[in-house]
Image: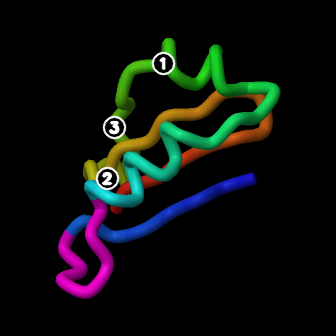
Amino acid sequence: MLIFEGDADFISNYVGFVSMVDALQTQFSTAYHSQVWTPYKVNGQVTGQYKAAGTFAYLRI
């Protein structure tokens, strides 16, 4: 499952999304919380950050 959102969106607060994703309880929660933010690149340019574990990922663009 991929959850994504934009950090420049004034309507949707990305800090709230981070809190919501961190509060989710899945079989990958422990592994997800131990991950560090990784740059997400498109055509070699950093366009966001992501964390992923198993089939669960959160992408902030």
- Residue 9 colored magenta? yes
- Which quarter of the figure has residue 30? top right
What segment carries the magenta color? 8-14
The residue that mark 1 highlights is 35
The residue positioned 34% from the left and 62% from the top of the image is 61
How dense is the environment of label 3, judged by Cα within 10 Å: few (below 14), some, or many (20 and up)? some
Residue assigned mark 3 = 39
- Relative to the observer, which residue lies in front, 20 or 61? 20
**Contact (Cβ within 8 Å) of mark 2 with mark 3:** yes
Foreground mark, 2 or 1? Answer: 1
Camera-side mark, 1 or 3: 1
Residue 53: x %, y % from top left: 67, 27
Q: Earlier in the sequence, mark 2 or mark 3?
A: 3
Say which mark, if any, is on residue 48: 2
Examine the residues drawn in magenta and state their main secondary structure: loop
Instruction: Tell me the element at label 1.
Output: loop
Mark 2 or mark 1, earlier in chain: 1
| Distance in Å between CA atoms under marks 2 and 1 | 16 Å
Which residue lies at the image location 18% right of the left edge and 83% below the top edge?
10
For the residue marked with disc 2, what is the amino acid?
A: Gly
Q: Amino acid at mark 3?
A: Pro
Give the quarter of the image for residue 14: bottom left
The residues bearing labels 1 and 3 have C-alpha atoms spaced at a distance of: 12 Å
**Percent x, y for residue 12?**
32, 78
Q: Is residue 27 above or below residue 40?
A: above
Q: Nearer the viewer, residue 2 or 44?
A: 2
